[in-house]
Amino acid sequence: MTPIGKYNKYQNTNLSWAESIPEHWKVYRIKHQFQILKRIAGELGYDVLSITQKGIKVKDIISGGGQLAMDYSKYQLTEIGDFAMNHMDLLTGFVDISKYHGVISPDYRVFKLTQRESDSKYMLYIMQLCYTQKIFFGHGKGVSMLGRWRLPAENFKNFAIPIPPLEEQTKIAAFLDFKLAKIDRFIRMKKQLLALYVERRKSLTRKIINSESVQFLRLSSITDLVQRPVDRLDNEFYTPIGLYNRGRGIFHKEQTLGKDLGDSNFCHIAKGDVILSGQFAWEGAVALASSFDENCVASHRYPILKCDFEVIRPEFLFSFFTISEGHLLLDSNSRGAAGRNRPLNPRYLIKEKIPVPSITLQEELVEMIQSENRLKSIINRGIIFIEEYKTILIAEAVTGKIDVREFEIPETLEEESYEELEEELSMAAEEESEYGNLEEI
């Protein structure tokens, strides 16, 4: 492949996020490239679409999950190839090109490319970069910087973007498609490696609950439903937590002032707590708190179990809830029929009996979970770096920091091994990348 370099000459711009671009590029306002559309469906029968941070998806309106509208005939039409963005939320919203003929919320912005001298994939890369790097955010308006921060139509139409000639746009988009697909494969391999280790841990859990040393003990006799109430101060910052489903752990929400935490009651979290989601335990939303989570708080919607260390290790209880036998207890004690809204009744749950192996066998599981957590930490740090690198690569390509015009994409794309992918991405990091300085955007 031809080495990637820089352009020979650059020109200055008035763009804060792209202060210089190649001399032959131009800067256009979005209104000279796109037309905003508003076509109300007026009837039912279309696929209902939603905009997620992974792109436009077909919404499941049958199961009743998530927010549902009363009348989808008032939604706006979205055709294949249309752009759609959640301009009402510049913090967590996104933009994508629709692959579907359907309808989408009238609160979203649908627009189409009007210039034949523009490549839709190149334009999408720029638009998505403006979300991920919060470039649009600086042009937004709203009541609260932490609430609905929207991009008004006039601000959107007057937003300026760098645009190279069409052939060059297509080259840049193809280069990014190729490189990002390779990066995404590497991330998938990392996650598969962790998933294999998780399956080993679950297999050991199943093995030890069938050992001769097992006793069937009521949860209420070996755990406590604990509450450590937070004495909330209005001007103190707190870090609320949430849980991923399928036992994938705890995530930390943004730090929030006590006065902005809402009406929920909160409890302090301690290392070794087994935390359940009151709403989604039936989906496997259970986690084991580590020292990293100790300064966080959980709302009353997250029941917390503290284990009697003489009888049961928290690592074992967590792992038990992630296998089918434990999941059955979480599912059967989650009542309700309103879609995904099936609250867990922790008072019923702790009346259940569970198989508890000897402490010696539980300690084997503790060691495996400690190794799993170390592996997860290493993998997650690597993924964070690779995701940052991916964003920088996109920024450098669409702002002309790198010249990919001579880059040749192989005609036959072969699946690289994990080691080959890791070597290329490691070299890119160590050498500040063949694509340019990683510290610059």
Image (cartoon, helix red, strand yellow):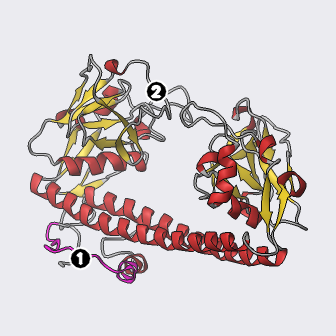
Give the residue displayed 73% in from the left and 45% down from the top.
298
Q: Is residue 255 visible?
A: no
Residue 209 versus residue 232 in the image, above or below = below
Residue 79 in the image: above or below residue 107: below
Q: Would you call the spot at circle 2 few (<14 residues within 10 Å), some (14-19), or many (20 or more)?
A: few
Instruction: Report the mark closest to the observer, 2 or 1.
Output: 2
Residue 140 is situated, as x and y percent measured from the top left of the image, at 43, 33
State the residue position of label 1: 414
Residue 74 falls in which quadrant of the image? Answer: top left
User: How many angstroms separate mark 2 from mark 1 (CA)?
Assistant: 43 Å
Q: Which one is in front, 168 or 104?
A: 104
The residue under the point 35% across, 45% down is: 55
Which amino acid, mark 1?
Glu
Please report the bounds of the magenta region as a residue range.
405-423
Q: Residue at x 81, y 38 (%)?
A: 232
**Viewer-nearest residue: 103 or 44:** 44
The correct choice, above or below, for 243 with respect to 290 in the image is above
Q: Quadrant of residue 211?
A: bottom right
Please report whichever mark, 2 or 1, sits nearer to the chain's N-terminal start. Answer: 2
Mark 1 Cα-neighbour bin, 10 Å: few <14, some 14–19, many ≥20: few
Percent across and percent down for residue 106 are: 35, 23
**SS for callout 1:** loop
Where is residue 333 drawn, in percent x and y?
70, 43
Q: Quadrant of the C terminus?
A: bottom left
Instruction: Please tell me the numbered disc located at residue 166.
Output: none
Which dot marks residue 68? 2
From the viewer's perspective, tell me whether residue 259 is left or right of residue 123: right
For the residue marked with disc 2, what is the amino acid? Leu
